Image: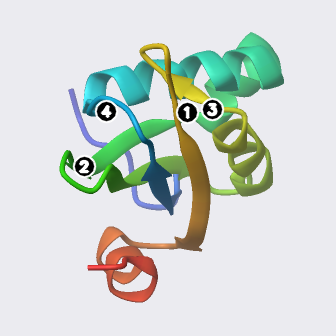
Amino acid sequence: MKHLPKHIRPRWRYLVVSLETRSDAVGRRAFQRELWYAGQNLLGDPGSADADLSVVRFEFDDATGTGEAVVKVRRGEEDRSRAAVACVDEVDGAPVGVCVRGISGTIRAAVEKHSRT
């Protein structure tokens, strides 16, 4: 199968998301699942498919209970995606605080500009 020409390929934006919790560790898969559920519940099936939320990078420190994730979304769906991320309030039954720190056009720029580490 051939690759799509550059002008037809989907364009992406990257959200840097901070996570905080007082209880157990948060895993990448569990956070991804909750992100999909939040997007589906808020935006519906067509809106969730348009946003195409997916976790690209994930780090969580069990000792401090904090972490960061980089979430990939389609360009033009940033505001709706931010709202869906804000709807995540628990992961695997543990309450979690979520904050979108910033948006960027590349993963590298997102990490350099908006990451705490």
For the image shown, how many numbered marks are present on the structure?
Answer: 4
Mark 2 crowdedness (10 Å alpha carbons): few <14, some 14-19, many ≥20: some
Q: Position of residue 50 (x, y in %)?
A: 67, 31
**Disc nearer the start of the sequence (3/4):** 4
Label disc, if present, on residue 88 of the rendered structure: 3
Q: Judge whether 16 appears above or below 44 on screen.
A: below
Q: Amino acid at mark 4?
A: Val
Q: Quick check: marks 2 and 4 in contact, CB under 8 Å?
A: yes
Secondary structure beneath label 1: loop
Q: Tell me the tag on residue 26.
A: 4
Q: Nearer the viewer, residue 39 or 68?
A: 68
Residue under pointer 1: 52
* Left or right position of 97 against 78: left
Residue at figure coordinates x 37%, y 82% from the top left: 109
- The picture quadrant where one finds residue 92 is top left
Camera-side residue: 24 or 79? 24
Q: Position of residue 67 (x, y in %)?
A: 33, 55
Across and down, in percent, residue 33 comes to: 44, 18
Q: Nearer the viewer, residue 115 or 39?
A: 115
Q: Is residue 9 shown to the viewer in this render?
A: no
Query: Which amino acid, mark 1?
Result: Asp
Quadrant for the N terminus in the image: top left
User: Label 2's element?
Assistant: strand
Give the quarter of the image for residue 30.
top left
Amino acid at pointer 3:
Val
Q: Secondary structure at mark 3?
A: loop
Label 2 or label 3, whichever comes before in sequence order: 2
Please state the horizontal and vertical placement of residue 36, each as a whole percent of the image. Answer: 55, 21
Is 71 placed left or right of 102 in the picture? left
Name the mark nearer the viewer: 1 or 2.
Answer: 2
Q: Quadrant of the C terminus?
A: bottom left
